[in-house]
Amino acid sequence: MLKLLRDNMTPEPVAQPELIGMASPADKGDFVLTLYLYRVSENGESRRNEPLPRGNGMLQHPPMAVDLHYILTAYSNADLQSRTLDEHRIIGRALQIMYDHAIVRTPYLQGSLADSGEELRVALEPLSADALSGMWNFGETPYRLTVPIRVGPVLIDSTRIKSATRVVERHIRLEDKNRT
């Protein structure tokens, strides 16, 4: 998500890619736009039950499917009169990018996600205003415009591997049930 936002939001409305980062709203530093992972939940719809073959008679337990829940927050250093408008422009552009990239694929996936060939779906998270303001429990930090998003499913490989041999011989025994 970070690469997607950095590639598509600079130089306008954010001057430099380094001003978009992952940080808590309480510790935003110099960022203009932050992504903050606030929750991870299991994605039951994408759950897999079958073990995966790993060669040489080995089977790996299926991966765990999770959704990542983020809040996206904009910050502007503009003067008081134009700060809110500036933050709305930043959030609006971020929403356009997520809408246009509702399914995230390579080159925006990195590491093991890129190698797996998986796709991630991005969607707005339907949260109430009370739930959002409850997340802003950072002491003296005032509430800011925040957009909750859900990204997933992310598949996390299991480390459990067991050996399994193929069936190479079978024995069938037939019996007449009426025979005493």
Image (cartoon, helix red, strand yellow):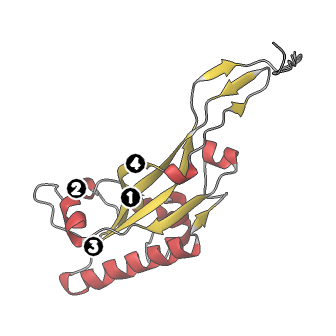
The residue shown at (61%, 39%) is 49
First along the sequence among labels 1 and 3: 1
Q: Nearer the viewer, residue 47 or 128?
A: 47
First along the sequence among labels 2 and 3: 2
- The answer for how far apart the CA atoms under marks 1 and 4 are is 9 Å
- The answer for how far apart the CA atoms under marks 1 and 2 are is 14 Å
**Mark 1 near mark 2, Cβ–Cβ under 8 Å?**
no
Dot 1 corresponds to which residue? 70
Dot 2 corresponds to which residue? 26
Q: Identify residue type, mark 3.
A: Leu
**Mark 2 near mark 3, Cβ–Cβ under 8 Å?**
no
First along the sequence among labels 1 and 2: 2
In x, y percent, where is residue 121? 55, 62
In x, y percent, where is residue 173? 86, 16
Drawn side of residue 90 relative to residue 142, left or right: right
Q: Which mark is residue 3?
A: none
Q: Identify residue type, mark 4.
A: Val
Q: Which is more foreground, mark 1 or mark 3? A: 1
Q: Identify residue type, mark 2.
A: Ala
Q: Which is more foreground, mark 1 or mark 2? A: 1
Dot 4 corresponds to which residue? 40
Label 4 residue SS: strand
**Mark 3 near mark 4, Cβ–Cβ under 8 Å?**
no
| Residue furthest top as drawn | 180
Label 1 residue SS: strand
Dot 3 corresponds to which residue? 145
* Mark 2 crowdedness (10 Å alpha carbons): few <14, some 14-19, many ≥20: few
* Mark 4 crowdedness (10 Å alpha carbons): few <14, some 14-19, many ≥20: some
